Amino acid sequence: MPNKPLLVFCLRRVQCPLVEIMREAVEPASACRGVDGDGLGSLISSIPPLAARVLRVAQFPGEGYGELWLRVSGGKEALRGFSAALSRAKGIYHQVLFENKFNKLVRIVLGHDAESVCPVARSGACPLNPVIPGAMVKSVLILPQGVLYELIVARSNVLQGLRNGFGCEILDTRSVDDMDYMLTEKQELALIYAYLRGYYNFPRKVSLKDLAKKLGISVSTLAEFLRRAEAKVIEAYVRHELPHYMAAVALYGPRCVEEIEAMISGKRNGKVPAQQVAAKTKAVVVD
């Protein structure tokens, strides 16, 4: 394998109280046993029911606590279960700063006075804020299965260290070019112009043809600017605001598209086979 920079998604099992809270949130007491004994069972489909993107991690050992800021997204029932599980947890306090039916911004404070809260809190070695030689953490997602890392890896030979030294299962590797969702100047200008002129209103105040005529360019050129810009904006939105869909792509790839089709059409009936779930979620428990 050539030594080149990569964008890498990897899954790691860790002893983290927030992973346990995630699991509790998506596991009804009488259901979901039987996939490698991990309690995920039939709840695992190609769309994770719940995920949290870590926005900030800060440890304050002298003060006796750590602070986390999370963007949590998922199904309505799972989000309610997450809030309920947080409220029941001893030594963990939370504040909801914003929420709607499918998304919430949460500040969490974890006390360091009891090892049962976080077994590694006093050491400062939080798995949600890892230091990995040769890799930069781009995003961290907390899932019921463990912690999902999106990394920019300087050299492909770092992958072996992720597997053996860091205890990760490598789910996907791709070119770092795939992380580019910044708009070009013309894409940005076209998008803002179309927005200000009412092209995205419902109903539309102006047609694409009228916009192109006003700008003195062809309809096809303007359409290309807008479509490329829209794709990048959607990419950024999913990554930052909807972590459970970002996790779906990393864990299951095209299968999540099929499930979304079923959900929109009202015919959701598919679950990822248990053996596929076990293969995807098999990882190392880190002490």
Image (spheres, rainbow, N blue to C red):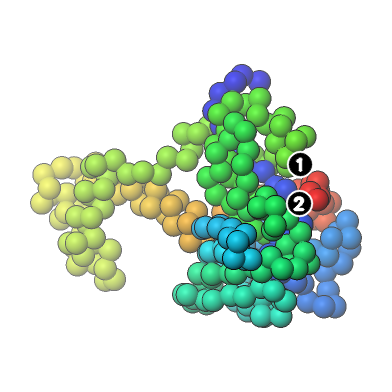
Q: Is residue 103 left or right of residue 120?
A: left
The residue at the point 67 percent across, 43 percent down is 10
Q: Position of residue 31 (x, y in %)?
A: 83, 74
Q: Residue 235 or 255: which is nearer the viewer?
A: 235
Task: Tell me if residue 279 comes above or below residue 194 in the rendering.
Answer: above
Q: Position of residue 183 (x, y in %)?
A: 32, 44
Secondary element type, mark 1: loop
User: In the rendered structure, which disc, 2 or 1, sits on the residue that comes first in sequence?
Assistant: 2
Q: Residue 189 or 147: which is nearer the viewer?
A: 147
The residue at the point 77 percent across, 64 percent down is 115
Which residue is the site of mark 1?
A: 167
Q: Quadrant of the N terminus?
A: top right
Name the kind of residue labelled 2 in the image: Arg
Q: Is residue 40 left or right of residue 182?
A: right
The residue at the point 77 percent across, 34 percent down is 164
Secondary element type, mark 2: strand
Which residue is the site of mark 2?
A: 13
Q: Residue 227 or 110: which is nearer the viewer?
A: 110
Regarding residue 271, the answer to whether it shows in the image is no
Q: Is residue 121 left or right of residue 225?
A: right
Residue 26, quarter of the rendered image: bottom right
Q: Pointers 2 and 1 in contact (CB under 8 A)? A: yes
Task: Tell me if residue 210 comes above or below residue 153 in the rendering.
Answer: below
Q: Position of residue 181 (x, y in %)?
A: 40, 44
Q: Residue furthest front?
A: 62
What distance separates the C-alpha of mark 2 from that of mark 1?
8 Å
Disc count in the image?
Answer: 2
Regarding residue 67, the answer to whether it shows in the image is yes
